[in-house]
């Protein structure tokens, strides 16, 4: 009798444990599915130049295995940072890039149309840093080429989400006398560049909007997170957004750029990556610096689109 009773108790216990395991598995599956519901398997193409592949910094060859380099140069850059952020946010994106140093969108049209003309879900693209290499500040070439590229991409996928990325003020174009923006404050070039990208975005309904990376740099400077003038030294406790050439971005600048793209494309709050974010650690960005740049990105994204509520999330580990 005692043996039968114990056996019955054990059978019930195993049944209960089985139910708990099954239930837990189902809940975990639902949780994973829920975390991926907004971006499961979406494709992203980054198209641009050295301002996206991270020239002048450790970002250039950062984790290239995370992305597909369509030009076969094994670069990581901002696309790899973006991909790493999405992994830590529990999102699934398939990221590719087609990047040519010193190029505008017109060169990608002329030389890489067959490479980029695919049915992408998202495309982030930008042109030359001064809008026009030969006519700094003139947006006409950007407007024309961005419209043509958007039309080409739209033909491949009518639902493609195309975003232009407005780039930053170049210190080498602002402080030295030879610079086109010499005599103006450091924020002006980024604002002029943004105005050019706004014109390009308004030229066709196929472009969804502009990611204000340059204005995020302006915000970092205005709030004291970053130093305004790398030519006279970097202030205590501040970061230098530029590389040593005062032209390209440095690690901090590209990190901020990637945070902006992440927030814009995913709708997730970059602050949730937190001070322990893995890329920052691997690239030598301190915890306080990472948190400060994440806050700048959040503030700029919120300011540029006040109707958009960025989702909070629990950061997941980034596999080695």
Image (spheres, helix red, strand yellow):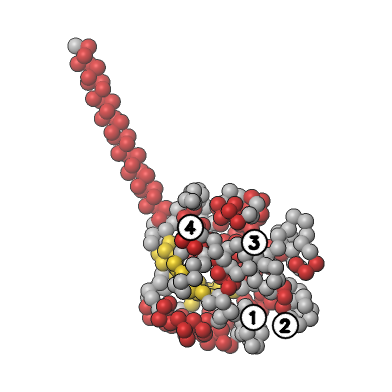
Real-space Cα separation, disc 2 to disc 3, in angstroms: 25 Å
Secondary structure type for disc 3? helix
Secondary structure type for disc 2? loop
Kindly identify which residue carries mark 4.
86
Residue 264 in the image: state x and y as whole percent.
52, 65
Checking the image for residue 180, the label placed there is 2
Residue 301 visible: no
Farthest-out residue, front: 73
Checking the image for residue 252, the label placed there is 3
Residue 130 in the image: state x and y as whole percent.
64, 80
Of the image marks 2 and 3, the number of the one nearer the N terminus: 2
CB-based contact (under 8 Å), mark 4 and mark 3: no
Secondary structure type for disc 4? helix
Of the image marks 4 and 3, the number of the one nearer the N terminus: 4
CB-based contact (under 8 Å), mark 3 and mark 1: no
CB-based contact (under 8 Å), mark 1 and mark 2: yes
Mark 1 Cα within 10 Å, few/some/many (few <14, many 20+)? many
What residue do we see at 66% from left, 79% from top? 192
Real-space Cα separation, disc 3 to disc 1, in angstroms: 21 Å
Mark 3 Cα within 10 Å, few/some/many (few <14, many 20+)? many
| Image quadrant assignment for residue 14 | top left
In the image, 65 versus 287, the foreground residue is 65
| Above/below status of 320 relative to 52 | above
Real-space Cα separation, disc 4 to disc 3, in angstroms: 19 Å
CB-based contact (under 8 Å), mark 2 and mark 4: no
Of the image marks 2 and 4, the number of the one nearer the N terminus: 4
Q: How many marks?
A: 4
Secondary structure type for disc 1? loop
Kindly identify which residue carries mark 1.
130
What residue do we see at 51% from left, 84% from top? 107
Residue 198 in the image: state x and y as whole percent.
58, 78
Quarter of the image with the N terminus in it:
top left
């Amino acid at each position: 009798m005692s043996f039968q009773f114990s056996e019955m108790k054990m059978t019930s216990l195993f049944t209960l444990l089985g139910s708990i395991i099954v239930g837990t598995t189902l809940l975990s599956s639902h949780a994973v599915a829920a975390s991926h519901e907004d971006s499961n398997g979406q494709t992203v193409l980054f198209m641009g130049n050295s301002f996206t592949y991270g020239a002048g910094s450790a970002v250039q060859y950062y984790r290239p295995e995370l992305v597909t380099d369509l030009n076969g140069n094994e670069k990581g850059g901002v696309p790899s940072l973006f991909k790493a952020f999405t992994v830590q946010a529990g999102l699934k994106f398939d990221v590719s890039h087609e990047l040519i140093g010193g190029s505008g969108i017109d060169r990608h049209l002329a030389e890489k149309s067959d490479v980029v003309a695919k049915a992408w879900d998202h495309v982030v693209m930008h042109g030359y840093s001064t809008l026009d290499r030969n006519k700094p500040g003139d947006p006409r070439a950007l407007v024309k080429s961005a419209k043509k590229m958007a039309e080409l991409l739209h033909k491949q996928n009518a639902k493609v989400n195309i975003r232009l990325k407005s780039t930053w003020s170049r210190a080498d174009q602002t402080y030295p006398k030879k610079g086109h923006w010499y005599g103006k404050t450091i924020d002006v070039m980024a604002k002029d560049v943004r105005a050019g990208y706004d014109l390009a975005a308004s030229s066709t309904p196929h472009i969804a909007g502009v990611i204000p990376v340059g204005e995020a740099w302006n915000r970092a400077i205005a709030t004291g997170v970053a130093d305004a003038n790398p030519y006279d030294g970097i202030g205590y406790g501040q970061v230098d957004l530029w590389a040593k050439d005062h032209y390209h971005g440095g690690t901090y600048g590209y990190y901020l750029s990637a945070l902006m793209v992440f927030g814009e494309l995913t709708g997730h709050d970059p602050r949730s990556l937190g001070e322990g974010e893995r890329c920052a650690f691997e690239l030598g960005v301190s915890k306080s610096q990472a948190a400060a740049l994440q806050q700048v990105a959040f503030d700029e994204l919120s300011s540029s689109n006040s109707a958009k509520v960025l989702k909070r999330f629990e950061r997941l580990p980034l596999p080695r």
